[in-house]
Image (spheres, helix red, strand yellow):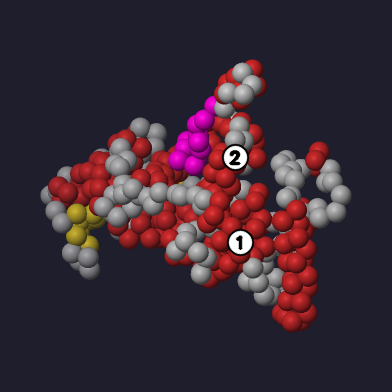
Amino acid sequence: MTKRRSRGDGGLHWDEKRQRWIATVTLGFDASGKRVVRKGSGKTKTEAKAKLKEVLRDHEDGLAVAPTNYTVANAVDDWLMYGLAGRDARTVATCTSLSRLHVIPALGARKLRELSGEDVDKWLAEKARTLSTRTLQAIHSCLNRSVKRAMVRDKVKRNIVELCAIPTGQPGRPSKALTLAEAEAVLKAAEGTSAHAYIVVALLTGARTEEMRALTWDHVFLKGDPDAKKSRRTIALPARCVDALWQQFEEQGWDRLAAGDQWTENGLVFSSATGTELDSTNVRRAFRQAITGAEGVEAKEWTPRELRHSFVSLLSDNGVPLEEISRLVGHSGTAVTEAVYRKQIRPVIQTGATAMDQIFDGR
């Protein structure tokens, strides 16, 4: 007769339906009094016993035993559902998109407990053929944070993703800036289009595209001075911006009348024909349509974010100090400004030359 297994060693039986040996172990009871049973299976007794021993070893180490079929996709879905609580909606959307496009299709079916460093390295190397380094960092972060959350919840022993290096990806498209002549051509071409006010304000204030899309009339002061104490960052508007915004305000009024009941009032300065917020694709398409025909400018080669680079470049060309440019674009110091806009900044120190010209008048 087969010797009975000792108490605590679990059970081992043949499942005719699955045609596999099943190892089971009871780990106590949960808060509701239900017995906690974990199972491991294998084609042979030895394989099933090995999985049973692994379950028992984890239990003895004080770890909760995760289901053996818990996959990478389960971990990522759990992180997307609960790990991003309180984050900005755009952050959630970005993380969800990256996870659905790049993480789950490639690694989702892999059991989390069996995910190896080699799996992650191969995945990143494959992605490096088509993605930029920044995107590689983002998808690595999504997977890393998902596994880290699973590890905290005892779904896996360690986070192997954190130990894997991120390779260098494909170089992104370098940003560029409009010259003064090109900027004038863009402003002229945009006159009369729906994107005119957007282009004028973006180019003449250096505002970020996400700031422009979220800008509301409550934060725009076309008469008098705003209370700067109530604003984190207040920028004076050039006269050309004021004129363009008054025109935008009037045209939006006509849009509101035309939309009727379909209009959704969000107080946005730049909105769709029904008052809803624009997304980046809407803005990019309208921007390129507006500047089509601008002399010396190929519309398809420019994006709205490069209006901010042009703002920095034009100020630098006109001798505005780097410290002042940093304040205008909302950076806490010059380091970020130099790193991001290095190609658009002219590192010319004119103070000494100006002083010497004054000293040696006539030269």
The residue at the far top in this view is 359
Left or right: residue 49 compared with residue 247? left
Instruction: Give the residue at x 42% y 53%.
Output: 76
Location of residue 281 in the rendering, given as x and y in whole percent from the top left corner: 52, 66
Marked residue nearer the N-terminal end (2 or 1): 1
Q: Position of residue 27 (x, y in %)?
A: 39, 43
103, 9: nearer the viewer: 103
Task: Kindly identify the amino acid type of the residue bearing the numbered disc 2.
Answer: Asn
Residue at the image position 22 percent from the left and 62 percent from the top: 15
> Where residue 120 appears, x then y in whole percent?
28, 46
The residue under label 1 is which amino acid type? Leu
Visible residue check, residue 265: no
Q: Which mark is residue 318?
A: 2
Task: Give SS at disc 1.
Answer: helix
Bin the neighbour count of mark 1 within 10 Å (Cα to Cα): few under 14, some 14-19, many 20 and up. some
Say what secondary structure mark 2 lies in: loop
In depth, the one of 123 and 307 nearer the eye is 307
Residue 95 appearing in the image: yes
294 and 217: which is toward the camera? 294
Q: Residue at x 46, y 50 (%)?
A: 176
Q: Which mark is residue 187?
A: 1
Disc 2, disc 1: CB below 8 Å?
Answer: no
**For the point 52% across and 56% down, which residue is it?**
182
The magenta region covers 338-349
Residue 348 is a magenta residue? yes
| Number of callouts | 2
Indicate the quadrant containing the C terminus: top left, top right, bottom left or bottom right: top right
